[in-house]
Image (tube, grey):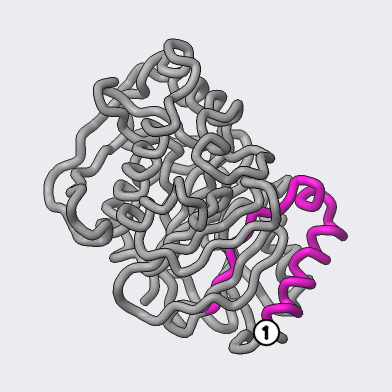
Amino acid sequence: MPVFAYQSLNSGVQVDHGVAASNSQRFTKSTHTNIAKSDKPWMLSMPVAEGAAPDVPVHGPAQLLPTAKDIYKKQGRFTDKVFLNLVEGKARQTHQHLIRSLGQCSVLVYGELDGNHSEWQSMQQHAGNLLTATSTGKACNSFSVHTNGSGSHRFIQAGMGWIAIESDGIRALFVHVPNSVATKKDLTRKFYSDIHSRVLQSEGGGVIDVIMGDTNQPSVGYTQEVVSGAMGQSFAEFHQGKQIQPEDAYQRSFGGTNSNASKKYDVAVYNTNTVKIENLVYLSQCVDVAGASGAAAITDHMGIGVKIARV
């Protein structure tokens, strides 16, 4: 059964898609400030092996870390080199958490990251082989699809705010729904309806099985409702409600997946006629920072992972 994961970075509107476009953006700092309100250790940092393939299991216990206090106030922002290392480390952490909870990750997709840019090429050693990367202009409108060494993976189609791929016979749509579209039901419905038509008409395309990513939805259940109407299929959401305990968090939960934990933007919905979600996990916005004895937020949205099976 394939395991899909999505993680959005917090990138800007720069036409240069390098590391600087994603480094220490305003909402990332807001996320860190919000998470740092608690003094208790909470983040579970898994052991990793830098020289190994990222989806190779690394055995050992997790380290329990607090949020690194005032790290953004002290230095303003990370250097681009340090920030790149943190994103790479987060990718390896993602693989290790998914291995333990869902199994080896088949496809790891990054929103707001252009893997074709030379500064992001090293991500292939930490996230997995680059299947494809797309962009519609700005850094925040980019996607990168990383895969492991096994299975069958194929790019289908992409456009503004979305990319569709097929992995082991399951068609997955990853989205970063534009803010100008996400809260207006007629525009959101058209967004998904147009994607549905393009994927159906693409060579090797067909009915979409699962949709996941940063929906920017205004309320819980919105995406499930709009997608079902737009695609003429019954879609359901595996994770109900707003309260979320990330897989890399110990005895700590959040009221949303966005920067201030108030909105559940990051969701996965699935086509009940074709597939079922065996399990779903969230991952926090944080990663451990060497020398800081704590964790720092490096993006403003939680990551999400799902294990999918055909019905």
| Residue occupying the point 61% across, 43% down | 16
Residue that numbered label 1 is attached to: 202
Can residue 108 be found in the magenta stretch? no
Q: Which amino acid does label 1 sit on?
A: Ser
| Residue occupying the point 41% across, 19% down | 38
Residue 137 located left or right of residue 56: right
Q: Where is residue 78 in the image (x, y as percent from the top left)?
A: 43, 25
Q: Position of residue 120 (x, y in %)?
A: 44, 49
Residue lying at the far bottom of the rendered structure: 204
Residue 117 located left or right of residue 87: right
Q: Is residue 83 above or below residue 147?
A: above
Q: In the rendered image, is residue 306 in sight?
A: no
Q: What stretch is highlighted in magenta?
A: 171-200
Neighbours of disc 1 within 10 Å: few (<14), some (14-19), many (20+): few
Q: Is residue 233 above or below residue 96?
A: below
Local secondary structure at mark 1:
loop
Q: Where is residue 244 in the image (x, y as percent from the top left)?
A: 48, 43
Residue 296 located left or right of residue 9: left
Q: In the rendered image, is residue 12 in sight?
A: yes
Q: In which quarter of the image is the N terminus?
A: bottom left
Residue lying at the far front of the rendered structure: 118
Q: In which quarter of the image is residue 189?
A: bottom right
| Residue occupying the point 33% across, 68% down | 148
Q: Position of residue 50 (x, y in %)?
A: 20, 48
| Residue occupying the point 47% across, 53% down | 304
Can residue 186 be found in the magenta stretch? yes
